[in-house]
Every structure is written in C-alpha cells, then in structure tokens.
Image: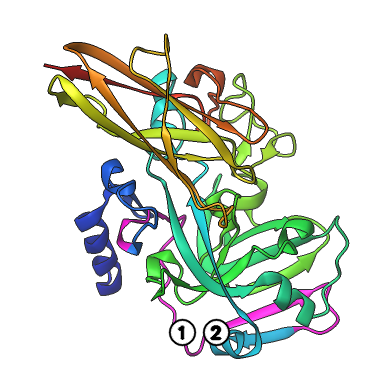
Amino acid sequence: MTENATSELERAQANLLVHSTSPLNAEPPMDRLVSSFITPQKDLYIRTHGEVQHIDGASHRLTVSGQVEHALELSVQDLRDRFPRRTLTASLQCAGNRRADLQEVKKTEGDPWQAAALGNASWTGVSLRDVLEAAGAATDASLQVAFYSPDEIEVEGETARFGVSIPMPKARGGEVLLAFEMNGETLQPEHGYPLRVIVPGYAGVRSAKWVSEVRVQDGPAESPIQTKDYKLFPPHVRKGEADWDAGLTIDALPLNSAICEPARGARLKEGPVTLKGWATASERAIRRVDVSIDGGRSWLQAKLQQQPDQPHAWTLWRLDAELKKGEHELVVRAFDGAMQTQPDTPDDTWNYPGYLAAHRHRIHVAVE
C-alpha cells in the first residue's frame, strides 16, 4: 500500500465504518451523521470503484469536447478565473445506500451499506452549464454529457476508464457543478481532489471524482460502469441473466428516510427518548415525516429541519417520544411534495445488485 493510500485508509478508519479497503468504501456512524445539517468532510461517506487518484492540482486539466463549437482545455485555476463561482448545498447519496436491509431478505451484490452512505455539504465550484456554453455545446435534449476520469475500474470482468453521463437537460439545469471545494475546504483525494462533478438529486456515481473530461455526445458514456452497472432489474432477474439494455439506468433517486438515533438493537432506559434521522426526495421537497414506536400500528409526526432556499439539501427530522419497558419496533416513513410515501418492506424493492433500498426503515430496540 502506498503512503498516500495508507493516509486515506487511516483517515477512514479513524472516522468511518470501513466496508472494503480496495476499493476504499466506508460510511460514518449514523448518530454522528445526523448531528449536523452540514456533513463535515471527515464524515462524508467514501465510495470508490477503483484506486483513489492522487493528482497534482496545478497541472490537472479538464477538456471539454464532443459536439461543441470549440474544444476547451482548462486548469482548475482557469475555472476559478473565467467563470462565476457558485456555492450550493446538496446531498450526495450512493444508490446502494441501505443495501444491508435488502441483504436481510436475500443475498445481493455489493458492500453492506447501512443507512449512512450519504451526506449533505456546501459545494463550491462553477456551473457546468456555464462551461458548456463557453464551449458552444449543442443543446439538443437527446444528447448526453459524459464525465470521464483517470481511474480504471472493473465491471463484469471488463476493465476500463471510469465514465458516466447525464442527460443534457439535467446538465444545463444550472445546479450541476464542477466543484473544487467542500464546506469551504479543499477536497480530500478520496472525495475528488482537485475537481469533481456534483449532480444534485442523482445517484452519487454520476458525481464523478477527479474529472478530467467533459464530452457532449449522442449516447451514454461507453464505460462499463454506465452500460453494465447502476441498473435496476426486477426481483426475478438473477446475476448472469441480466440484459443490460433492459435494465433501468439509475439517475434520480427515490424518496427515502432512515432512523439514525437510537441505534439498531440499542438498550434504552424507560421514559423520554429522542429519535433522529434523515429524509431525501431527489427533486421534490420532503413535506412530512412520520415515526411509529409500535411497529406501524400508530404514527407520530416528526419535527423537520430544512432549508427551503436549498432545494437539493436533505431534511433532518427528530421526534421526542416516551418508551415503556419492553421490545419496540421503530419505523419511519416520509412523504414528498407529490404526497408519495415509501414501500412498506424491503421485499417490495429487492433486486440482485442491491440498489435503491427505499422501503420504510425499521429498527428494534429494548427498553428496560
């Protein structure tokens, strides 16, 4: 292991629950995750598909190519100097968040993420739309904007450069950033230094780290992580049977919520207890969060912590309740701006890759 890789692993081990070391994947303790509306960089989950890249920020270049009037080659300093700086608060979430719940139903692929493979941060960079306009990029809604990075990854036995893409309308929405800071700090290598993409509301995989190329093209990125991964299949499809063209490409994430405090399996004292957690709804607002302390037979309405001027941020919630002696099943459900709520059980959304676990989150606690 290199000196750089050792330091990153040491940072992760000091702050996070490490699921794998190569690639490095880790999430924070759930109670610490919801202790602050803005997630500190040390507490942001780490999701890598290959090796963490160590790039000299001064020499790094971003190229803008494809269906553009004139190709660009920009340093990070060029981005700072030539384009208006923009800061927005947005949550970032892995499509595999809460996979451990699906694995209780049946084995899936992937790391057993609990409910903390997400975070909410203040990102600073420049608007992707501004950069595309500077290059004279075509704007047809059928086009895709692809992001390529130097890390090599393996998917389904195929090794290739990391590359993902998003539809042109999303790319031109104004909220997608080419970011170089998180919470006013320089990005750590494991979080994408010196430059990463932030695509609010979309699965974290679309927010490419160490981005070195933006390409406007007719179809999705050619990388296997775009063509053979992050696809949603129905429950009857098993690994080895998947028709990649038939799988649904995961972009926007579903309505979701989780209980982060108390911990699963906690032993509590009889009396007052404060329950805390998060809720997200991609491009819709969270309108209500209900919590049950009796397995879903009755519900209490939680208090919400939101920033209405930050529509891409998560919602934190809390509920003060009284628990009597005995075993309790705690359940949370959220409602979004369309009055949609979550599926009841993990059986409803099980799929072999273990993506988009968005059922009601349930934990058991004992009260003495």
Instruction: Name the secondary structure under disc 2.
Output: helix
Q: Which residue is mark 2?
A: 76
Residue 294 lies left or right of residue 169; in this view the side is left
Where, quadrant-wise, is the N terminus in this rendering? bottom left
The label on residue 25 is none
Question: Magenta span has 294?
Answer: no
Please report the bounds of the magenta region as a residue range. 42-71
**148 is higher (above) or lower (below) than 206:** below
At label 2, which amino acid type do we have? Val
User: Foreground mark, 1 or 2?
Assistant: 2
Q: Is residue 107 above or below residue 65?
A: above
Q: Could you say which is closer to the camera, residue 342 or residue 300?
A: 300
Instruction: Give how far across and how far down residue 54 sits, in percent.
Output: 40, 75
Colouring scheme, one of rainbow, by chain, secondary structure, one colour: rainbow
Mark 1–mark 2 distance (CA, rounded to whole Å):
7 Å
60 magenta-colored? yes
Instruction: Find out whether the residues at labels 1 and 2 contact each other: C-beta distance under 8 Å.
Output: yes
Q: Judge the density around disc 1: few (<14), some (14-19), many (≥20) Cα neighbours within 10 Å.
A: some
Task: Report x, y in % for residue 106.
Answer: 44, 20
Residue at image x 24%, y 63%?
Answer: 11
Q: Main secondary structure of the magenta part?
A: loop
Relative to residue 366, is residue 357 depicted above or below?
Answer: below
**Residue 366 relative to residue 133: left or right:** left
Q: Earlier in the sequence, mark 1 or mark 2?
A: 1
Residue 57 badge: 1
